[in-house]
Amino acid sequence: MKNVENRDIMHALNQRFRYTVKELNVRLKQFDLYASQWAIIYCLDSFGTMTQTEIWRYLNIEAPTVTRTLVRMEKAGWVNRKQGEDKRERIIELTSNALEKIPSIKKSVDSFDHEMLSDLSQQEKNQLYMLLSKMKTSGETAE
């Protein structure tokens, strides 16, 4: 096997990412959700109430994109957006409706995750997770 080039790795990663998002959207359709909305719900379910700024920083998504998504999610009854101490700050929390639906969504997503990773051994999953965590993210500098 030839040495794999950086561009080959990044291309394969991007292809898998696009496929994963597309298939996850198919699974989430029954809940009237998209992967981007599920990411926010997952974030709030994991960490509790957050500011919009904390959400976009954690998810590494541009602020206007998160704002648009949250407005849609609020209209659909998934989140409440409240004004924070600073007039510009928005506090985001899950609604009781969202909290009620999360177990069913998690069950569907867990099934999807299992299917996507079923060909990997536990050792390979651990290795993949470790390798992904070693990749640079925005704001990190090379040493």
Image (cartoon, rainbow, N blue to C red):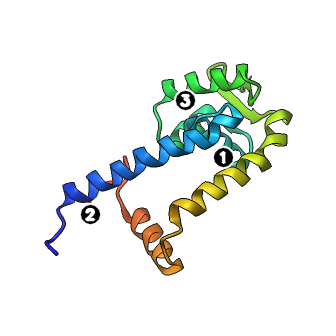
Q: Amino acid at mark 2?
A: Glu
Residue 74: % across, % down: 71, 23
Q: Nearer the viewer, residue 98 or 139?
A: 98
Residue 38: % across, % down: 63, 40
Q: Earlier in the sequence, mark 2 or mark 3?
A: 3
Check if mark 2's residue and mark 3's residue have beta carbons within 8 Å.
no
Question: Between tags 3 and 1, which lies in front?
Answer: 1
Q: Amino acid at mark 1?
A: Tyr
Q: Is residue 90 above or below residue 29?
A: above
Residue that mark 3 sits on: 66
Q: Is residue 128 above or below residue 76?
A: below
Residue that mark 1 sits on: 42
Secondary structure category for the residue under label 2: loop
Q: CA distance from mark 3 to mark 1?
A: 14 Å
Q: Nearer the viewer, residue 61 or 53?
A: 61
Residue 131: % across, % down: 39, 68
Quadrant of the frame with the C terminus: bottom left
Q: Nearer the viewer, residue 95 or 63?
A: 95
Res 34 quadrant in image: top right
Q: Is residue 24 left or right of residue 43?
A: left
